[in-house]
Structures are given as structure tokens and as C-alpha cells.
Image (spheres, coloured by chain):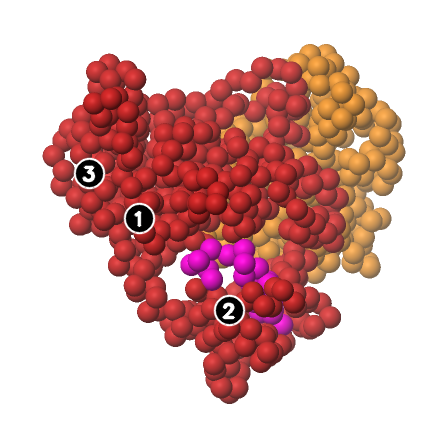
Amino acid sequence: MVPGGVRRQETFSEAGKKNIPHLYQDMLPSAVFYSSVRNDGVTSHFNSISSIVTGNWQRVDDWGMQPPATPTLFEYARKQLGLDPAEVWLISSNKVLTEQIGASSAIAYGPGYRANVVFPKQLLVTAVEAAIQQGRQQNMVDRAKVQQEIESVLRGSNYEGLGWNIMGEQQTGEMLAPVESAIQQFVHSNAPTTGDQLTYFVVVEVMRKYAPSILFVNFSDIEAAHFGSYSMHLAGIHNTDRLIYELWQETQSNAEYRGKTLMVILPEFGRDPDGSNTNGFLNHRSNDDTCRRVWMMCIGQPLSHPQVIDRPVRQVDLCPSLAAWMGCKATESAGGVLAELSV
Amino acid sequence: MNQQENLPATLRKAREDRLIERLPITFQPFLNQEISRWELKFPYEQRYLESLVGFLDSLPPDRLADLFSGVRKIESSMGINEHQFSPHEQTMREASILARSPHYLEWRQEIDRVFQQIDQAAFAQEQARLSRLNRLVLLIFPSVLPVDPQSVAEQWQRGRLLRLDWAPKDSPQRSIVEGILKGLPQADEQSAPGFLEEFAGRPGRSFADVWVLEPGIRLRTLLSGLQSVPPEPPRATLLSFDQLKAFREGVLDHIKSMARDISDADAIYAKLRSMDVSEWCPPEVGNIPAVREFIRSLFLTGNGSPLFSNAFVEWGAVEAMAHARPTVVLAEFGLRNKPKPFTSVAVFENQEKATPQPPVPDPEGSALDAVMLAYYTWLGAARYVEYQRTACLCLFEGVPYALAAGPTEFPLWKEKEPVPPERIAAVLRSWLA
């Protein structure tokens, strides 16, 4: 689980813990918690996520026009463990990501070992924009019609413009039923109508249909901070906290996951400090600890006992640690294996 | 060529001396851009630029080489060359090349070090002079925002909460804001010019000395003495989020059309930087080139300024202090609507256009935003030497309380409570005197 940028002061601090009741009260007591995790790379979305999934500080195009330069965890696992294409998924709300995040440009790996990539929020954005451009604003006040608008994009697009890549194909009927089910729940539930909420419903559907071995989820409601609204940023943190907890509960109730799932929660980065010339919480480009130093929570059956690790670690340590935990090797990663995550 | 003729002698000489060509590649676009925009700069920026360029141009070749040797060395490690970098204008593509380099932090630190040396050598005297001036940041939380003054005081961790002597029922026609900005009504029930109008009207003041930023038009209506009619020179910089609607929407429409591609982004931004925006400008913005360009730049740098009035007020105030070093910043925060279901995911900027669903105000969310952004405005002032003697007053209209902060000499630290608005006005008038 990789949320966007959150500072310690709004999360794991005395003042911030009220924003994350589930992480703090329901999950932390059972978790291995790393209190100091550095992002020493480029603190943009595409490069940070690429660095986490490859275990190397990536310096590729921030707009997602280039794939990561070294192999991803998805590729290591698929190649070395012989995982089926349906076993590895990346589902993200962030509009800045592209399908290039699914596989690297490494010659020995690459698209043949890619993760399936799905951007549920992009589906919603495309549907809303199409309705507005074509004068169907009225449909946006009627939930049944909202559902029709979104489904129409899903069925008519061949994923064009959505940036999805599922089972190596641009077009497949495979995902229609689970995504339609997610849309149905999203539109008719009383949950907030945010991009992350739709992402959550799609993630649950994918878990129930495919039970992937590796599932990378990226939430981005938190990034409302860029619009200059602190209250929306905090609402994003609350929402992320709830959705992560609900996904954790799904792993506890779904027989495919119960007792054999490790969940890791690692923010992409923090945000800039109050009073910085980069305008504080709105951005994430300063070279301060508030931006570079985050935390990581690991929770799940395979971990021996809950503990708080204050030893500084790096985001690039996660990929080789997860690879080792799964039984493969992140041979090209610059990160080290975290002993606490070893079986 | 006309542009060259309008430059002051220092800058013309630097061009003749080919100063820019003698600077490191990553420094050239910045300085070229600054000089080419000379006429669009505020008086403070012009003084700074003249000092900077004059200093660099006056350095003997060996000292100039010494000053930039660190930057050149890092550029070499970065593999930067003239084929990658346009010397004329800073672009997103170039910024992205720098930011993705493993040497970026070193480069940034070295650039900071160079500027510190230049500032120390070329601008310290002027900064010392400016730092002796009394300044004022006045932030208004209107009664529509449910803000708890105590929580603001706790966040700021400095300042004094003052109970105000104000009973709305005693003067239903007037707000406390009016009481402070305009003073007591005269016998004919008309208000005399307030302390701010009086300050802006003093000889030697420029439009850049007093800034008023607000969501609507309440303050500009109240402070009519800050407005002028051409050919009279402007007395203040008056910026209203509502009045800039056409400008905001024009910029956002262009940005929205941008493909996910950095060269396209640069093309769109270049177009927005060069296009004639007169038709989007209300007169008080369009008639002053520096203000018009300030707004253009404000919206292009984003930070929520084209989207939400409170972000506009904060980012505008912070950028005003960065570029114009005003003596007085008067900023009022306001109320925004809640994001609409479904459509707000895609369309933030014009939610009325997105769906006919009626807007729902969000006073609690707006108040939370305003509290944080007011704090950022105050911290924005604290970044500059010139703001060492800045008094800040947060006015909580609905309570009524005020939070006073600033140097110990600011009289409101010791004022006896409850304080009547006319006493606040008198203190502020004398502070700015």
C-alpha cells in the first residue's frame, strides 16, 4: 500500500495520530513499524514509486514516458518464481502514473514479465470529462446515469486513454465484470465519491477474482494538498487510513489471503515543511526531513512479533526484502534486505 | 531593440560586456529571463536585479570564475552542456533535467551559496535599510468562518490573543473590520479615510507598498481611497479572486488542454507566458504591467491559486512579499464550496459547469484551510530580512478577538483589554508612521 505524500506531523505524531485512527490503534499494535525510512531519490510520484518497486533510486521521466531503468519486484517474481500474468497487479489512483510503471527497460526482464496495471480513477475522470464535453452534465446528479457514463467509457474505450494494461493486452473482456461490479458499489454506496474509493472497490474485486500474489496499491486522495486545501488533504489522510484498514480486513476474511499475507504501508514521501519557500504541505520537493523521511508499517502473519524499529532504513530496501520474503532475489537492487521481514 | 533601450545603464553595460555568456550554463536562462522582463518587475525587484548584475559585471575575471567555479564543476559532473540548455528562458524540461540528476542537491546548495555571496556583497546595505522599516500583515477571518482564535494562537506559538471591545448589536450597520480599517464614523455617518488609505496616499508611496488580497470585493469597496482613476498612478495593488475569474479560467483552460508530455507542457507554458492577457484583466490589474505579470506568474505556479480563493490569497501574499516586499499586506480569507460528488474528481476549477447540482458551502473546511494558510502567510514574511520589524494582526471577525504578533515594540503586546477597534486603528496608524 503506497499512499502519496504525507508528513509525520499529520500521521505518526502526537498531533497527527487522530488523522489515522485505524493505522494507529487497530494496526500498529500488531505491526513491525519502521519509524525512519528515507526517500533519497527524486521526490516526484513516478520516480518515487519506480524506486520503491525496483529497489533503486530511479531518475527517469517524471511524466511516466519512460519505464524504470532496472527490474521491478513484479518482474523478479514473475521470472524467477514463474508467476502467471494474473498473479501480479498494480492498481493506482494517481493520474501521473502510466502503464510504463508495470515493467522495466532491463533487457533480461521487461514487458514479458510485467504487472497488470489499472488506473480506476482515470476511468472516472474520463467519464466525467466526456459527459461535460458532450453536454450531459445533468447525468452527473443521477447515480444510475453516473454508472452508465462510467460503464460506457469502460466498454467503449479498449482502455484507450485510461492507460491500463491487463494480461499484456490493450483489450480484454477479462476485467469487465469485476470493474463493473466495482463501479456499481462505488456509485451506489454511501462512501465518499473519491478516486481512492473507486480504486479500493477495484482492488477488492481483483483480490476476489484473481487472488494475486503481489498487489501494489497506490492511493492519491491525499494529493488534494496540491490544490491548497489543508482540510481536503486531511480528509484524504482519513480516507486512506480507512481504506487501508478495510483492505487489511479483506485479507483477514478472504481465504486466499488469510494467514499468508504480508501488508506493507509505505508513503511515497512526506511533504514540504511549514514555512518553506516551496509552500509547505502543498508540495513535495524540498530537501528537508519532513519531505524525505517517512515511516513504514508491515503487518501480517509471517512476521514474528510486533516491534518498532528506529534504525534508519531506505525505501529501496523494501524491494529486495519483499523479493527475499517471496523466495526470489532482486539481483539488481541497491537496497539491503530488512532482517525483520525475513521469514 | 526597444527593450534594450529601456534598460538601465547597468544592465545595458552588462549586455555589452557579454556578462551572461561568461556565466555557467545553468545560470544563464535565469539571468536572461530576469533582464528581458525588466519592465515587468516591481521596484524592489528592479533594484535587486541592478545590484546583482552590476556586482557580477564589476568582478574581475578571476573573481567571477572563482565565484562560479563550484557551479561549473557540478554542471560538469551532471553532464550538462549547451545543447541541452536554452540560455534564454527557464523551462520545465530543463528544470526536470536538473531535478533528476543525482547531483541536483549539490547544485542547489551551490547556487544558494553563490546567491548568499552576491547578496552579502551587493545588496546587504539595502537590505539593512529595508529591515529597519515597520511593516504590517493584517489577516482577516470573516465571521462566516468558524475559527477558534485559541487554536490559531496555539499553532503560531507566539503572539497575544486580545479580546476586542465590540458588540455587533450596538452598531449593526458596521463590521469590526470597518471599525478598524475606517475608524469611527463622522457626524454625517460617512467614514473618513482609514489609516491604510492615509498611509497609501503619502508622498513617495508606490502601488507595490500596499497589497490587498481578498476572495470578493468587500475590502476594496470599503477602502475606496486605495483606488485611483487613470491617469492618476495606482495607490495600491488590489487583487480579488472573484474579479480575476476570466484570467483564472483562461489559464486553466490552456493547462487542461496539455498532453502528458513535457515538451507540450513547455509549449503551453511558453504560450501562456507570451500571450496577450489584457482581455482577462480587470483594469486595476491590466493597467499595471508588473501586477499583470505577477498574476500571470501566480496562476502558472499554481499552488491552488487559480482554484480556491484561500489558496489565492495566501500564495498571492507570499509571492507579493517575495517579489515586491510590500510594507502592508491586507488579506482576507473566505468561504469555498464542498467538492461535488463524482465530478470533483475530474473538475475542480469550475464545478458549476460540471454539474447542475447546487453548491454546498463548506465553512468548517474553509476555516481549516484559512487557519493553515494564514499561518503560511505569516511564515512567508518571516523568511526575509526586510520583514524583521513586521507586526501581524489576525482579526477574528465573528468572535471578536485578534491575535497580535511581531516585534516586542509592537504596542498591542501591552494593550489593555478589551481593545476598541478605533484604538487598534490608532496603533496601526502610528506603527506605520
Q: Is residue A105 left or right of residue A223?
A: right
Q: Earlier in the sequence, mark 3 or mark 1?
A: 1
Q: Quadrant of the N terminus of chain B?
A: bottom right
Q: Is residue B313 left or right of residue B194?
A: right
User: Counting other residues with Cα less than 10 Å from the Cα at mark 3, is it few (<14), some (14-19), or many (20 or more)?
Assistant: some
Which chain is disc 2 placed on? B
Which SS does the magenta portion mostly show? helix
Image point 47% across, 62% down: which residue?
B46
Q: Which percent across, then down, holds residue A321? A: 61, 51
SS class, disc 1:
loop
Q: Earlier in the sequence, mark 2 or mark 1?
A: 2
**Amino acid bearing label 2:** Pro
Chain A appears what colour?
A: orange
Residue at label 2?
B8
Chain B appears what colour?
A: red
Q: CA distance from mark 2 to mark 1?
A: 27 Å
Q: CA distance from mark 2 to mark 3?
A: 41 Å
Q: Which percent across, then down, holds residue A138? A: 71, 14
**Amino acid bearing label 3:** Ala
| Numbered label attached to residue B69 | none
Count of residue discs: 3
Which chain is disc 1 placed on? B
Q: Does the segment drawn in magenta span residue B37?
A: yes
Q: Share a chain, discs 3 and 1?
A: yes
Residue at label 3?
B426
Bounds of the magenta segment:
B23-46
SS class, disc 3:
helix
Q: Which percent across, then down, holds residue A181? A: 74, 19
Residue at label 1?
B202
> Residue extending furthest front?
B231
